[in-house]
Amino acid sequence: MANIKSAQKRIKVAETKTLRNRMIKSALKTAIKKFEVAVAASNADEAKVTFAGAVKALDMATSKGVVHKNMAARKKSRLAAKLNAMA
C-alpha cells in the first residue's frame, strides 16, 4: 500500500478507470457476439440492426481510448464483410 497521498490517489483513479474500461469492453464484446449470432442464424433483419449496434460500440470504445482505432476499423471491416456475404 502506498504511503504518499498522490500515490494513493493514483491507485484510486486507476481502479476507477479500469472498471470503466472493463464495462465498455464487455459491452463491445456483447454487441459483436449478438451480431455474430444473428449472422449464424441467417437472420438478415436482425443482423443489420445488431451490426449498427456493434459499429456504434466500436466507435464509442475507440473514442474513449479503450481500443485502438486501427483495431476498431479492422473489426468493422470484417463485420461488414460478414453482413455483405449474407446478402
Image (tube, helix red, strand yellow):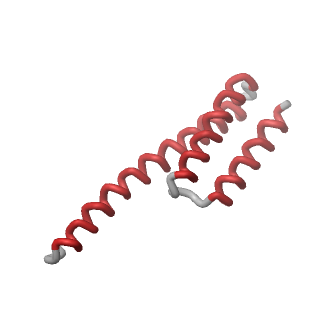
Residue at the farthest top position: 45
Residue placed at 72% from the left, 55% from the top? 74
Extreme left residue here? 3
State whether residue 43 is above or below residue 4: above
Query: On the picture, is 3 further left or further right than 16?
Result: left
Percent of width and height locating residue 65: 52, 57
Q: Quadrant of residue 12?
A: bottom left
Q: Residue at x 68, y 25 (%)?
A: 46
Image x and y of residue 6, in percent = 22, 72
The quadrant of the picture occupied by the C terminus is: top right
Residue that extends furthest to the front in the rendered view of this protein: 6
- Image coordinates for residue 13, horizontal then vertical, percent: 30, 61
Q: Where residue 67 appears, x then y in whole percent?
A: 56, 57
Specify whether 76 is left or right of 58. Answer: right
Residue situated in front as seen by the camera: 72 or 38: 72
Which quadrant is home to the N terminus?
bottom left
Furthest-bottom residue in this view: 3
x 33%, y 63%: residue: 14
